[in-house]
Amino acid sequence: MRGVIMHAPGDVRVEDREVPAILEPTDAVLKVAAACVCGSDLWPYRGVEDVDGPSPMGHEYVGVVDQVGDEVRDVQVGDFVVGSFFASDNTCEICRAGYQTHCVHRQPGAATGAQSQYVRVPLADGTLVATPGQPDPELIPSLLAASDVLGTGWFGAVAAEVGPGKTVAVVGDGAVGLLGVLAAQQLGAERIIAMSRHADRQALAREFGATDIVEERGDEGVARIKELTGGLGAHSTIEAVGTQESMMQAIRATRAGGHVGYVGVAHDVALPGEELFFSGVHLHGGPAPVRRFLPELIQLIWDRKIDPGKVFDLTLPLEQAAEGYQAMDERRAIKALLIP
Ligand SMILES: [Zn+2]
């Protein structure tokens, strides 16, 4: 089969690889229908994270179950399934509390890399969710979005306690931030302020439910949000970047008693204790327990109530994966979908 390997920062190749086999009786192997390049794949691509030898890439995937291990009960060969980036048993105490990304048995969900023709998924019953039937092709991008960026944006909104009557600020206009806007709209937010300075992303944010756009960043961006909220700040802020600047922007844009849901993977973020102490805001976030939300998100997509697949503005054959990385790195594309 063919699959993506990152050799070094900026060096992504599609190579011949072994078709993965069942290793554990709880494994499944999927024939991948679609995969994509994640914003977090850009950290090693840009050399911000180390590339530890040749690495199979990709952790967002949908596909058809091709093989299952002897102990897999709920997922069957032929099912179309959506997985997530961490595998979970979905039975331990942490999973039952809705924190599957912190499962006591957690491990990479796409064990052999999802940017490939086949992928091995551990703990198949606890990780994969089957769709109600074989999806129409036009639903596949949205189902793929559920695998990570939609689930992550959704968790950001839930962690920020988004709800009816609330004003929500969203820091970050990548796929997760944009889908945080969509989630906030679905969860009943009254006002949604998207922070973006790119016209195409602003347009998509508005389509997903943003009521206001703030182009300023940093302290100026915070000042704009205060201005829009009677000097108080947002009730709920979704942080979808993961830098020091974005995290402080989120905390400072939130009113006392409000909530920050942080879902941008943090890189060198250090919070000043004294400012945090006097801010009076709640902080919650981390790697999104996408598995918690998958059944609900799949149903919303299946019923065509949401169309999160619109974040994919570039579709390429798997063989051209390197172009997908490059386009996202240069911000020519919001998110690249790869067809094996
Ligand atoms: Zn668990």
Image (tube, rainbow, N blue to C red):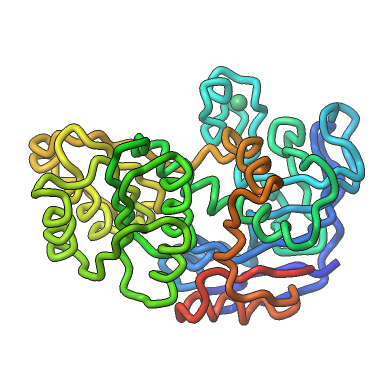
Residue at 84% x, 44% y: name it.
133
Residue at 78% x, 48% y: name it.
120
Q: Quadrant of ligand 1?
A: top right
Q: Position of residue 265 (x, y in %)?
A: 41, 52
Would you say residue 173 is visible in this rendering? yes
Asked if residue 156 lies left or right of residue 115, the reply is: left
Asked if residue 298 lies left or right of residue 33, the reply is: left
Q: Which of these two is toward me, 205 or 150?
A: 205
Q: Is residue 7 above or below residue 211?
A: below
Would you say residue 56 is visible in this rendering? no
Q: Position of residue 328 (x, y in %)?
A: 51, 75
Q: Which of these two is toward me, 233 or 15?
A: 233
Q: Which of these two is toward me, 321 or 214?
A: 214
Asked if residue 172 lies left or right of residue 217, the reply is: right
Q: Position of residue 106 (x, y in %)?
A: 60, 34
Image quadrant assignment for residue 278: top left
Residue at 55% x, 17% y: name it.
93
Q: Which of these two is toward me, 180 or 241?
A: 180
Q: Is residue 163 above or below residue 238?
A: above
Quadrant where the C terminus lies? Answer: bottom right
Residue at 29% x, 52% y: name it.
169
Q: Is residue 17 above or below residue 72?
A: below
Q: Residue furthest top?
A: 93
Image quadrant assignment for residue 243: bottom left
Quadrant where the N terminus lies? Answer: bottom right
Q: Position of residue 40 (x, y in %)?
A: 49, 60
Image quadrant assignment for residue 227: bottom left
